[in-house]
Amino acid sequence: MDNARFAIAIMAAGKGTRLKSKRPKVLHEIGGRALLLHVIAAAKTVVAAEDIYCIVGHEAERVRAAAAPTGVRFVLQAEQRGTGHALQQLKTHFVATGEAVPENLLVLSGDVPLIRPETIRALCEGHLRERAAMTILTAVPPDPTGYGRVLRAVPGGAEVTAIVEQKALKPEQMGAPEINSGIYCFRTAALFEKLDLLSTDNAHGEYYLTDVAALLVADGQRVVAVQGDSVDEVLGANTIAEMMHLDAAMRLATARRLMSEGVTIFRPETCVIDAEVEVAADTIIEPYVQLLGATRIGPDCRIRSYSVIQSSTLGSGVLVRNGCVMDSAEIADGAVIGPYAHLRPESRIGEGAHVGNFVETKKVTLGKGSKANHLNYLGDATIGDGVNIGAGAITCNYDGVSKHQTTIGDGVFVGSDSTLVAPVTVHDGAYIAAGSCITEEVPAGALALGRSRQVIKEGWAAAKKAARKS
């Protein structure tokens, strides 16, 4: 591949009517990421982003918005008239822009998310080795019914004579086992020469890219096939059920990859682990855990059952007890979270800190060794090292219009059921008496009490009972 320039075209213009969904087909997700983004990620391991052209059509702006951060280019197929028509738009793009036409063009489908970089490279290398005008990636499924078949000139040989759709198969061709994946390599000049010869004389009135194979063969040019190692990686999904089959396959592959790298996953079939998740060796993941988005987990952690961790970073030796929910949080080494803690975005939990039962945090920095173990809400707060937050204590960060900051210094003790009304600062080493409502700055080392004086009324209960009887 070093001696021949490749570009990649990704077909992403279709509607996917059989999904019965308003969402563009290529934006449906498996493994925590849109189908198209999986394909782009595989393509980017083979060529640079600027050499990838996404051909968009249905809901084009929505698809562009989803894929734009990847750096790929876009070509509009305003009217969807088949796969051949899509590449006609790419040809027009090169003519209109004057961009250099690549020597070779790889065509991928935006709804085939399991395609591996290794398979893409093997296809491209086979294309160059065979000096082909067109190279077809094929597969042999257990049941090829419904798929277009690839007919080879000689069994076991590389050369292809035709791609025949299921409905057009002759009786003697019904047993052909090899299917067309819809993934191709072309010598670009040969492809562009034949695109204008395509006809819409078919049941759907569309320009089919598969017809290019027959045109090339008739012209005496070489068309060959390369069989992929896996059927699953070249299959798309036309229904939600089929998509979930791909999702299960991808997630199981992710779990197996992590286990091969030293991660213990009990009952991996019960866990939901997105494709982007990274977990270091010697971490243990218990059943029914969800690890989502760009989550990164360090070594020697334990994630207990029913926890859901989204796009968060955990250091080494972190214990996440049962039923915790995290979203865009950062957890330092040796911290203990839960059970049933809720860490909302911008929660930063320090080394060795504890966030316990039914504690909720949001935009909080909790310092090294600090503890909030029971029934707390901590929002918009900076909390120092070695702080103890008693059961039921909260920061009141919202005045009905704006959010305000609470600052708690190192070594502070906040008694149970205390309410800190922001904006407020509690300096190092101060004590807040249990049940206090703190509205003013607390100096270092001071004891702050903000509660009503206790009143005792002797005999009150007996008098009340007597009054009820009278």
Image (cartoon, rainbow, N blue to C red):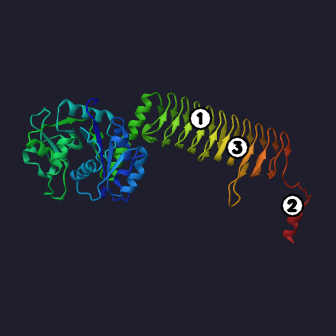
C-beta proximity under 8 Å, tags 2 and 1? no
Label 2 is placed on what type of residue? Answer: Ala
Q: Which residue is mark 2?
A: 461
The answer to which of 430 and 110 lies nearer the viewer is 110
Q: Earlier in the sequence, mark 2 or mark 1?
A: 1
In percent of width and height, residue 334 lies at 62, 31
Whole-number angstrom distance, CA of label 3 to CA of label 1? 23 Å
Residue holding disc 1: 319
In the image, what residue occupies the spot 13% across and 57% down?
A: 201
Which is more N-terminal, label 1 or label 3?
A: 1
Q: Are marks 3 and 1 in contact (CB under 8 Å)?
A: no
Residue 123 falls in image quadrant: top left
Q: Which residue is mark 3?
A: 382
In the rendering, at what x and y percent does residue 46 appear? Answer: 33, 35
Camera sees residue 139: no
Extreme residue toward the right, this view? 458
Of all residues, the one furthest to the bottom in this rendering is 470
In this image, 175 relative to 456: left or right?
left
